[in-house]
Amino acid sequence: MRATVVMEANISDTEGHGLMSIFKSDKTFSEPINWTTTFFMAAFHLGAIAALFFFSWKALLLAAFLWWVSGSLGIGMAYHRLLTHRGYKTPKWIEYFLTVCGTLALEGGPISWVATHRVHHQNTDKEGDPHSPQDGGLWAHMGWILTGQAMHNTAAGEYLSFVPDLRRDKFHVWISKWHWVPLTLLGAALFAIGGLPFLLWGVFFRVVIGLHATWLVNSATHMWGSQRFLTGDSSTNSFWVAILTFGEGWHNNHHASPQAARHGIAWYEFDMNWYGIAALKKLGLAWDIKLPRFKPTAQPGIVIPPEPVHTAEPVEADELVPSLSGD
């Protein structure tokens, strides 16, 4: 017997996550400061503010384009859906190109990023979650980066067991060590071509906006929004975060089926990262695409979604309906 699955519940006032005070009992203020990271974050934020005094339409359009390159091609399609969850496969040269795009976001190398995110999925909202809002809203957003030990766990070897696949790949090991090089070269090129406006908008302003957009997935989509699926954690779907992250804001959908390459499962759920993967498939550059096996409907139910399935051809979400047995 088939059963439809949906649970739309606003959880903004449940389990202590609703309108959480950012500063009250926030773990950020009880951990030692990572001075090097904090220095660079402060410098980039100052650069972003300076960009406002060097505005030009060309610089703005450049920033928007590079935001898509780094945030969608790099973080969403490469770091997250390809490298972390292996939601699809591509030729190695495509994987490496997308990975380089990801380094332009100033979110570290792929080994550190992937390891941290895999740990998050294993320990969501529990002890060991690197950025749970249960430790504070600011902590979940950026405090875990500026203070504490979470950012050092990969270097210390504590998270390396979560990325054996990337550690076997010489390119990923190399780019993880030298992840700052592509962004540095890009900055030099932009300055040579367009002076300070291109540098400030194409690097500093664009990077800061992209960082906060990514961080909102860690904070906002675990604090405010709606839940379609009972995933046993605080993950939610957020339209406005999805817009800012090219589709990563459908976080409850993602936690329900982590390996699925498609996060926006309803027609109205904007998911630019999925559109990019689908485009690669059309070009013969992506295959073994994993898709969710559930269908959003208006009928309530309580069913934990099954694991995604492999498919050679992408199919529409409204064609996928789970049964109680997971068939």
Image (tube, rainbow, N blue to C red):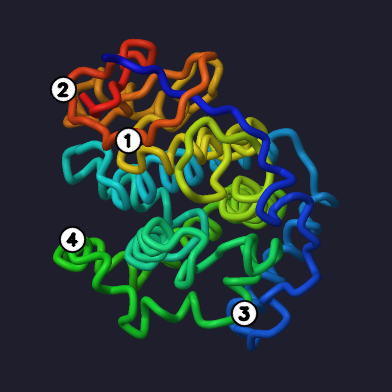
The residue that disc 1 covers is 260
The residue that disc 3 covers is 147
Q: Quadrant of the C terminus?
A: top left
What SS does tag 4 mark?
helix
The residue that disc 4 covers is 165
Q: From where the camera sits, is residue 170 visible?
A: yes
Q: Identify the mark nearer the N-term, 4 or 3.
A: 3
- Amino acid type at mark 4: Asp
Binning the other alpha carbons within 10 Å of mark 1 as few (below 14), some (14 to 19) or many (20 upward) gives: many
Q: Identify the mark nearer the N-term, 3 or 1.
A: 3
What SS does tag 2 mark?
loop
Please report the residue visible at 45 percent of the width from the left and 72 percent of the height from the top. 128
> Marks 4/2: CA distance?
23 Å
- Amino acid type at mark 2: Ala
Above or below 279: residue 130: below
Could you say where residue 223 lies in the image, as x and y percent from the top left? 66, 50
Splitting the image into 4 quarters, where does residue 211 fall? bottom right
Could you say where residue 91 lies in the image, as x and y percent from the top left? 16, 39
Q: From where the camera sits, is residue 206 visible?
A: no
What SS does tag 1 mark?
loop
